[in-house]
Amino acid sequence: MREERVFIDVKVNAARSSGYYVRCTQLREAIEKIETLRECTVVGLVYDGANTIELLLDPPLGDDEE
C-alpha cells in the first residue's frame, strides 16, 4: 500500500495521533480494490455511527463528464 494517509473530521479544531488502533482488513482490501478497479483515490471516509463506512473518491463514481 502507498504511504500513510490521514482522514480527520474537519469540524474538529485539532487532531493528533492517539495510539489507539483498530484492525480492519476488510477496509484495507476495499480501498485497494476500488482504487485499482476504478483508477481513483480514496480521499475521505464518512462514518455515521452505523456499521457501514462510505469511501469518498476522487474522481467520484459516475463522474463521466470528462
Image (cartoon, rainbow, N blue to C red):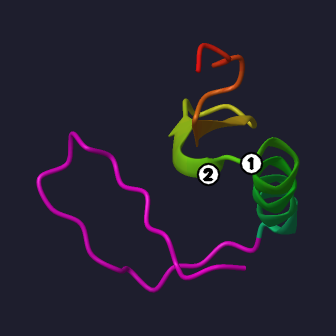
Label total for image = 2
Q: Is residue 8 above or below residue 25?
A: above
Q: Position of residue 63 (x, y in %)?
A: 63, 19
Label 1 element class: loop
* Predominant SS along the magenta part: loop
Quadrant location of the C terminus?
Answer: top right
Please state the horizontal and vertical placement of residue 46, each as a whole percent of the image. 54, 36
Which residue position is annotated with label 1? 39
Is 2 in front, or is 6? 2
Please indicate whether residue 34 sits to the left or right of residue 42 in the image: right
Residue located beneath label 2 in the image: 41
For residue 65, which quarter of the picture?
A: top right
Residue type at mark 1 is Glu
Q: In the rendered view, does 61 fall on the left or right side of 37?
A: left
Q: x, y percentage for residue 9?
A: 33, 46
Q: Is residue 21 left or right of residue 20?
A: right
**Disc 1 crowd, CA 10 A, few/some/many (<14, 14-19, 20+):** few
Q: Nearer the viewer, mark 2 or mark 1?
A: 1
Q: Nearer the viewer, residue 30 or 64?
A: 64
Q: Residue at x 75, y 37 (%)?
A: 51
Which element is circle 2 on?
Answer: strand
Region in magenta: 1-23
32 lies above or below 10 = below
Viewer-proximal residue among 3 and 7: 3
